[in-house]
Image (cartoon, helix red, strand yellow):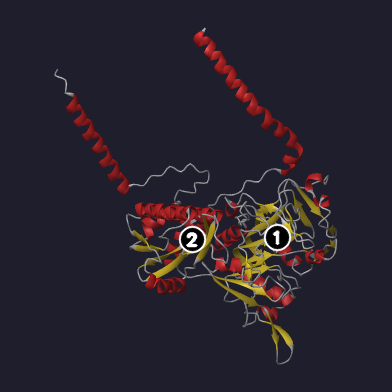
């Protein structure tokens, strides 16, 4: 048999390689494959996203991204990540996604008008400090996009809007959230009816400034307003409760009330629940006058009575009049010397195994009380948040001092614990009996103005023993204006360059919780995709510090010596 010449074989090999390349390119046009080695599959599209592209997108989506231009490396990284994500969208949507990058400063004459239009459409400018050749330059850029679908459009901001300088950690967090940011825009364009979430007012609850960040985030998905049940009547100087005050609300957030509820107000909320509406109870049972520590060396805690104990007990949960300390805790700012305390045991950082906390950074609670499940088992009680195993229950009255931390330290406690961990938040699910069942007169039950219900259909509510879980810290801008910090940020936690870094999961957890209760859980897996900080076991650190320091010093040396001995043995065997 005559063998082929080398030239012929080379030609056949080249043709074969070209054919394989063409085949791979053809397959890549119809199929998308990415190997995601991250633990939480941050870079893999969720099933709900791909299902949306395949089944619900019946037209072309045009996206304009305003990130073209020269930027520092970490912003360029964001731009590249946006492009890669859009290419992935294109592959799964069968090229129904069209996009282009635009430089707002490309035309100097039109730049101001374009930026004004972008701001009116919902994209906000952000700023960063670029350091080159020993000089600092403040750079404005527009990290956002306009998505157009049919006759509608929506703006997407990749970074959380706020009055702060953008840093690399914030950009990395935004990259992890790109799928969520885009899909949120897609769903907003195809949204149906929005639910109305109301914040209750009139009992000293968190005001708009203290809850501004969570309100801003909820507004992306819901109608958000405030509501009062009791109204002051100017004409006769009396207070009157409006029995229909909550009729337009789908859910009610009661965040850190400080004053007592009367029975008429409780009745209105009770019937709100009986009619299938949702309530988020964020209730403090203890008063800790922390502001007084600015002038006093210590203060005393005291129980707080808002007259909700009996009502919550009827639904299936008791909030105890105590405080929980935890070895896994967050920092606080000393009000007496303006320095941080990085391990304030009265600020537990907690989590759980519920879907609303999966892949979410630990949630920080401030002066939280323990919870107990009570009542019959017809209403299920699911733990949403719980302490670590290293917790300690403090009584209703004790002394709080910045200089006396050992008294709260769970690792030094010999306290006998009823449970391995302590529940701090519950989700209640079932058919609730009215708190006023058997207590209402027959004439009122038969009233034409209002129909009383003794029992609800299947419903859900949330009870958390901390009213500060959605409270944002407040700070001052360079211009002296009062501005809120995002819930993910803590003013006391910064990187080596002094930049704020995502630290708490409070905002993401609460948004997940609202979506879960309101039936909008499709965004939960996407919102939760971030690199969470893995907490170290503080008790193990304190007990085993010397052991691990010794291991870290000796093991590398022994390993090097072992390699040298193996190398010496091999050389002797080879050259003997």
Whether the residues at callouts 2 and 1 have beta carbons within 8 Å, the answer is no
Which residue is found at the position 47% from the left and 68% from the top?
Answer: 123
What whole-number distance in Å separates the C-alpha atoms at marks 2 and 1? Answer: 41 Å
Query: As displayed, is residue 377 above or below residue 472?
Result: above
Classify mark 2: residues with Cα within 10 Å, few (<14), some (14-19) or many (20+). Answer: many
Query: As displayed, is residue 551 above or below residue 461?
Result: above
Q: Nearer the viewer, residue 43 or 521?
A: 43
Secondary structure of residue under mark 2: loop
Examine the rendering and report whether any part of residue 89 can be seen: yes
Examine the rendering and report whether any part of residue 190 can be seen: no
Query: As displayed, is residue 118 above or below residue 337?
Result: below
- From the top left corner, tell me how far across and down residue 108 is, in percent: 39, 70
Which residue is found at the position 76% from the left and 70% from the top?
Answer: 306
Query: As displayed, is residue 553 above or below residue 135?
Result: above
Secondary structure of residue under mark 1: loop
Q: Which residue is mark 1?
A: 316
Residue 158 is labelled as 2
**Quadrant position of residue 506:** bottom right
- From the top left corner, tell me how far across and down residue 258 is, in percent: 75, 71
- From the top left corner, tell me how far across and down residue 335 is, in percent: 77, 63
- From the top left corner, tell me how far across and down residue 180 is, in percent: 48, 57
């Amino acid at each position: 048999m005559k063998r082929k010449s080398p030239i012929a074989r080379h030609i056949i090999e080249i043709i074969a390689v070209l054919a394989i390349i063409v085949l791979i390119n053809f397959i890549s046009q119809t199929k998308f494959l990415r190997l995601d080695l991250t633990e939480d599959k941050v870079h893999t599209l969720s099933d709900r996203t791909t299902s949306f592209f395949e089944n619900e997108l019946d037209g072309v989506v045009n996206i304009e991204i305003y990130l073209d231009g020269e930027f520092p490396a970490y912003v360029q990284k964001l731009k590249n990540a946006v492009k890669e994500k859009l290419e992935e969208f294109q592959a799964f949507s069968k090229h129904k996604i069209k996009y282009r990058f635009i430089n707002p400063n490309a035309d100097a004459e039109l730049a101001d008008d374009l930026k004004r239009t972008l701001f009116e459409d919902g994209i906000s400018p952000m700023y960063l400090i670029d350091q080159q050749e020993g000089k600092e330059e403040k750079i404005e850029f527009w990290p956002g996009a306009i998505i157009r679908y049919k006759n509608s459009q929506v703006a997407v901001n990749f970074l959380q809007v706020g009055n702060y300088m953008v840093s690399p950690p914030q950009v990395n967090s935004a990259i992890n959230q790109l799928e969520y940011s885009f899909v949120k825009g897609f769903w907003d364009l195809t949204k149906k009816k929005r639910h109305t979430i109301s914040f209750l007012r009139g009992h000293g609850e968190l005001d708009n400034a203290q809850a501004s960040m969570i309100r801003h985030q909820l507004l992306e998905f819901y109608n958000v307003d405030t509501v009062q049940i009791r109204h002051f009547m100017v004409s006769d100087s009396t207070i009157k409760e409006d029995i229909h005050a909550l009729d337009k609300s789908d859910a009610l957030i009661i965040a850190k009330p400080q004053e007592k509820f009367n029975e008429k107000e409780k009745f209105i909320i009770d019937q709100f629940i009986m009619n299938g509406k949702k309530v988020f109870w964020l209730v403090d049972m203890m008063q800790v006058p922390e502001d007084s520590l600015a002038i006093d060396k210590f203060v005393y805690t005291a129980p707080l009575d808002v007259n909700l104990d009996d009502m919550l007990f009827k639904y299936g949960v008791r909030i105890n009049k105590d405080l929980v300390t935890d070895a896994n805790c967050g920092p606080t700012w000393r009000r007496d010397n303006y320095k941080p305390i990085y391990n304030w045991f009265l600020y537990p950082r907690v989590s759980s195994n519920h879907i609303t906390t999966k892949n979410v950074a630990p949630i920080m609670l401030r002066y939280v009380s323990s919870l107990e499940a009570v009542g019959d088992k017809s209403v299920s009680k699911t733990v949403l948040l719980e302490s670590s195993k290293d917790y300690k229950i403090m009584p209703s009255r004790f002394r709080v001092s910045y200089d006396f931390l050992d008294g709260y330290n769970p690792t030094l406690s010999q306290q006998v614990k009823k449970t391995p961990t302590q529940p701090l938040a519950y989700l209640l699910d079932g058919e609730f009996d009215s708190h006023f069942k058997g207590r209402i007169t027959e004439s009122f039950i038969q009233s034409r103005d209002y129909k009383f219900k003794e029992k609800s259909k299947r419903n859900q509510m949330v009870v958390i023993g901390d009213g500060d879980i959605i409270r944002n810290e407040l700070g001052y801008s360079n211009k002296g204006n009062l501005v809120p910090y995002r819930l993910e940020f803590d003013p006391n936690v910064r990187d080596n360059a002094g930049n704020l870094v995502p630290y708490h999961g409070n905002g993401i957890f609460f948004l997940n919780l609202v979506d879960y209760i309101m039936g909008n859980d499709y965004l939960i897996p996407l919102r939760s995709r971030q690199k969470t900080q893995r907490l170290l076991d503080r008790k193990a650190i304190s007990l085993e510090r010397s052991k691990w320091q010794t291991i870290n010093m000796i093991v590398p040396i022994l390993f090097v010596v072992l390699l040298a001995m193996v190398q010496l043995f091999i050389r002797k065997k080879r050259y003997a």
